Amino acid sequence: MDDITKRIAILGATVAATLAVVAVVILPPIFGNLARSALDDLDEGVGLDAFGTDAELRVSFDDWDAGWFSSTAALKLNVAFGGISMLASETPFVATLRHGPVISGTPSGLGLASVELVLDGAGHPFLRELREFFDVDAAAHVGLLLGFGDAIAIGLNIPEFAHDGGFHFGGIKAVADMADDAIDFNGDFRGLLARDGTDGVEIGPVSLAASLYRDSRLPLMWMGSMRTDVAGFDAEDTGEIGPSSLYVDARVIEDRLVVRLDGEVSDFYFPSAGFPLRLDLAADVGLECGTDAVARLMQDFGSLQGLAGVLPMLLTADALVRERLSFDVHSLTLAHEGRSASATLAFEYRGGDLPGDVNIENFARMTRGLLSLPISANLGLAFHRELPGHIMRNLGAGDLVAAAIDENMHEMVRGGVFEEHGDDYTARLEFADREWVLNGETLDLATGSLGGQRSEATLVLAELVDELTR
C-alpha cells in the first residue's frame, strides 16, 4: 500500500471515529435537551373541537432527572371529554427517555429520543392486583419515538395473559406514525376467550390499518383509507359471526369529496331466533359531493341535537340536496336448514337532477314524497319456495298457517308478483323516472295492475309500495 492510500485510509478512519464519538458522546445530551423541551410542551394539552365534541388529552412530564444518555421523569395522564375527566393518573408513572440518535426500540426508527413507559403495579394498586391475578410483569408497554422535524411514532404492546384456563387474552400490538397532519396506523387485537362452564365468548383476532391525512379544504375531516378485518365472534346462546371486513376510503378529487364504504359479514348466526338462521352480507355505500357543501355541513353539525336533527339536514340542507348518494347491497343471503333466500339492492340519489333553485325552504314543496325525488332503485329477490312456510312452522305456527302462506305464494306467482325458476321464487322490482317495473312489466300503483292485467296480488303489492313511499 503506497503512502497516499495509507493516508486516505487513516483519514477515513479518523473521520469515522470522530463521527462515532459525536453520535455516541456529544449528540445524546443535546438531543435529550431538545426532546425534554418538546415533551414539556405537551403539558399544555392536545385538544379536539370538531363535530360538536370537546375532548382533551393532557400529558405532563415533571421532575426531570437528566442524564447524559437517558433521563427519567414522572408522567401524569389526563383525558377529558365535555369538561369531564374520563381518565386521570393520581400517582405518576416513571418514564424513561433515551437520548438520540435512536435507531432501535418500540417503535423503531431514527430520532431525537425515545420514551419508554412500562405500566406496572409500582404505586398503582389496580395494576398491581392485575399483575398478581394474571401473573404478568406489566400491564402494558408504551413507546414514543420523537423523530426529526415534527415526526412522532407511538407504539403500544399489551402482553398476552390468561387465568385458570377460562380466560385468555391474546394481547394488543399497535404502531402509529404521525407527521405533518398525516397518520399511518397498524394495530392487531389478538383475540379474547372468556368461558365459565358452558357459557362463554370468543373474539377472534382483529386487525386495523389506516393511512390518513388532513386536507385544507376540509380541515375537520381526516382523509385517506381505513380497513378492519375481524376473524370472527362466537357467543354461546347469543350468536356468531364469521370472517368480516370493513373498508372506508375518503378523498378530495377536483373539489369533490368522494367517499366509498365496502363491508362484508359472513356466517351471521342467530340461535335466539328459535331455529338455525344464517346470513351473509356484502354491500358498499358511495357518496360524492362538493367540498363547500361538506364544510357548511360540518360548521352546523355541532348545533344539532342528536340523530333526529342530523337526518333531516342530510336530506334537505342547502349544501347537500344537489349531491349524489349511492347504496349497493351486492349480496344478502339467508339460509335455514338447506333452504336459502338471497337479495340484491341498488339505490342512487342524484341531487343534480333537481329542477330550479332548490334550498332548504322550498325542498319539501318541490318534492312531495319519496317518488318525486330524483332516485332510482333496483331490488332483486330469490328464495326457495318452501322457505316461508318452513320458517312459520319453526316459529310455532301450525300446519294450517304454513299451508295458507304457501297458497299466498302461489297466488303471488299467478298474479305476476313472483316468477318460478326451478325450486325458487324470484322477483325484480325497479324504480326510475317515477315509474315502477316488476319483472319487466310496468306496475300501476293507482289500479294495482301489472302489464295491463289487474290481480289481487298486484293490488296488495301496489298498496304496500304506496304506503312505504308515501
Image: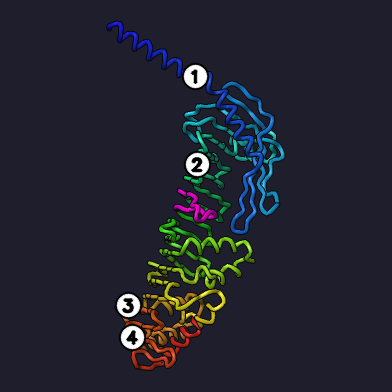
The first of marks 4 and 1 along the sequence is: 1
Q: Which residue is mark 2?
A: 179
The residue lying toward the viewer, choosing from 126 and 65, is 65
Circle 2: is it few (<14), some (14-19), or many (20+) Cα within 10 Å? some
The magenta stretch spans residue 346: no
Residue located farthest toward the right when viewing the structure as drawn: 90
Residue 356: horizontal and vertical position, in percent? 46, 78
The first of marks 2 and 1 along the sequence is: 1
Q: Which residues are magenta?
A: 211-228
**What label sits on residue 441 in the rendered view?**
4
Residue located farthest toward the top when viewing the structure as drawn: 3
The magenta stretch spans residue 226: yes
**Given the image, on which type of amino acid does mark 4 rest?**
Glu
Q: CA distance from mark 3 to mark 4?
A: 23 Å
Q: CA distance from mark 1 to mark 3?
A: 81 Å
SS of the residue at dot 2?
loop
The first of marks 4 and 2 along the sequence is: 2
The correct choice, above or below, for 426 with respect to 442 in the image is above
Q: Which residue is mark 1?
A: 22
Q: Nearer the viewer, mark 2 or mark 3?
A: 2
The first of marks 2 and 3 along the sequence is: 2
Q: Which residue is mark 3?
A: 423
